[in-house]
Image (cartoon, rainbow, N blue to C red):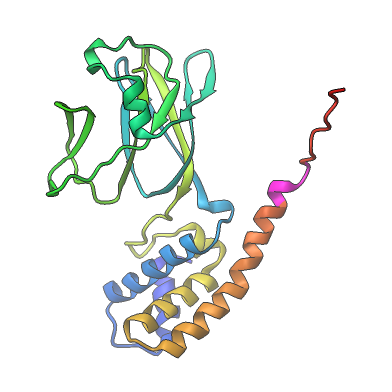
Amino acid sequence: MELSELHDEFEFLSGRTDLSDTRMSFFINSGQRYLDRLDTIKHSFGKIMRTVNIGDWYLTFQECRVIKEVYVSSATERWLLTKKELGELMLEYPEPIADIDTGDPLYYATPILRSVPQDLTSITLSKFVGEVVQVDHEHFGYSGIVWMPPASETLVVEIQGLFYTEKLTNDGDQSSWSVSYPDLLIMAALRAIEIFYRNTEGVKDWTGAIASEIVTLGMDFVDEESTGITEMEDTTW
């Protein structure tokens, strides 16, 4: 379904003919984010691929719920980075960026992007005390990674993880939920409106109905992930 069609169904099923398209979109997108967090299914996963240049050591990106793995690719090979705690990574590479030898990135960590008091114009990424980089967008909705050592050549960084579904804004917009499971999306939107109007019983009823449906999607995902995978037999004597 497109967003305009979701509006029609939402209005019919809720009986709320007094809501503007903007208000209905708010409840639909609220319901969609609820579904995103409720269980892990096939389309919960996504990836970001960015080209980075010599000397680069960080990336910022939006709508990522959980970073699962980070891969780096050169013209000839692809490898997985090892995750470290941010403090551990900074202690291992304490020198200023200009003094760190470039090379193949080996490790990554998730930085703190929020400064206090908050800067509404840019993100500040710190390699160490006294050395900062300003990224020209606010921190709201952003995640990031830093890696070491800095890249010694042009590379492609691939971040795999759990991502929020794209927000539905225009009449013709679609999402994985609206196309594959429009019934669940409408149910989640109806649950959202019950929350805002403080109808506890309504919220409880919709939560139970949604849970009984979405659990089967989670089971399908687990089944697909485990199909064809067998435990390696230990041949050590």
Q: Is residue 86 above or below residue 210?
A: above
Quadrant holding the C terminus = top right
Residue 155: image location, x then y, percent: 41, 19
Q: Main secondary structure of the magenta part?
A: helix
Is 206 situated above or below 78? Answer: below
Q: Whole-percent x and y of residue 222?
A: 67, 54
Residue 205 horizontal/vertical position (percent): 52, 85
Give the side of residue 190 with respect to residue 150, left or right: right
185 in relation to 9, above or below: above
168 lies above or below 88: below
Name the residue rendered at 15%, 48% in the picture: 116
Looking at the picture, tell me which residue is in the foreground, 167 or 132.
132
Whether the magenta-drawn stretch holds residue 237 is answered as no
- Residue at the image position 32 percent from the left and 9 percent from the top: 101
Residue 65 in percent (x, y) is at 42, 50
Q: Nearer the viewer, residue 123 or 112?
A: 112
Tell me what residue is drawn at x 55 percent, y 75 percent: 210
The residues colored magenta run 224-228
Number of numbered discs overlaid on the protein picture: 0
- The residue at 49%/84% (across/down) is 204
Q: Is 97 or 154 nearer to us in this picture? A: 97
Question: In terms of image quadrants, where is residue 16?
Answer: bottom left
